[in-house]
Amino acid sequence: MNYQNKPAACTISLRDANEQSVVWETLIERATSTERIEQGVVLTFDRGLTAQVEDLVDIERRCCSFLDFAIDRSSDGIRLVVSAADAAGLKVIHDALGVSAA
């Protein structure tokens, strides 16, 4: 997905955004690791959470087209890379996922 040059604005309703926040919080608590990278964040999960991560990403791709979501699967687990092309998108990632902008 090409997320460059898209405004950092979510397109879902406030109610749906609140529901998505709960899903994010639940998954973040279950992450086996969280790593800040130059253009975003990498979250690692046990393979048992693959369906939940994929469902979350499906929704996020529709409402937050200014972000890029990549899922890498391996026998060890599942990695979710959330990235942005600009500072506004990075701020959304860091604020939403509770990761320091460092």
Image (cartoon, rainbow, N blue to C red):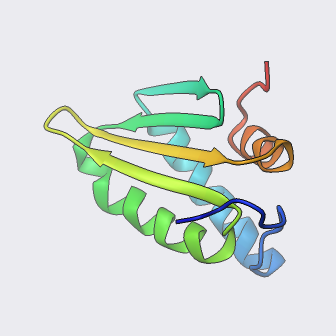
* 63, 27: nearer the viewer: 63
* 93, 6: nearer the viewer: 6
Q: Residue at x 49, y 43 (%)?
A: 81
User: Farthest residue in the top direction?
Assistant: 102
- The answer to whether 46 appears left or right of 58 in the picture is left
Q: Residue at x 68, y 41 (%)?
A: 97
Count every numbered label the image shows and give the total.
0
Q: Residue at x 79, y 18 (%)?
A: 102
- The answer to whether 68 appears left or right of 99 in the picture is left
**Location of residue 53 with respect to 81 vertically, above or below:** below
Q: Position of residue 38 (x, y in %)?
A: 65, 28
Q: Position of residue 83 (x, y in %)?
A: 61, 45
In terms of image quadrants, where is residue 54?
Answer: bottom left
* 85, 58: nearer the viewer: 85
Q: Position of residue 23 (x, y in %)?
A: 56, 58
**Location of residue 93 with respect to 11 vertically, above or below:** above
In terms of image quadrants, where is residue 37?
Answer: top right
- The answer to whether 45 appears left or right of 65 in the picture is left
User: Farthest residue in the left direction?
Assistant: 75
Q: Residue at x 52, y 66 (%)?
A: 1
**Location of residue 87 with respect to 10 vertically, above or below:** above
Q: Position of residue 85 (x, y in %)?
A: 71, 48
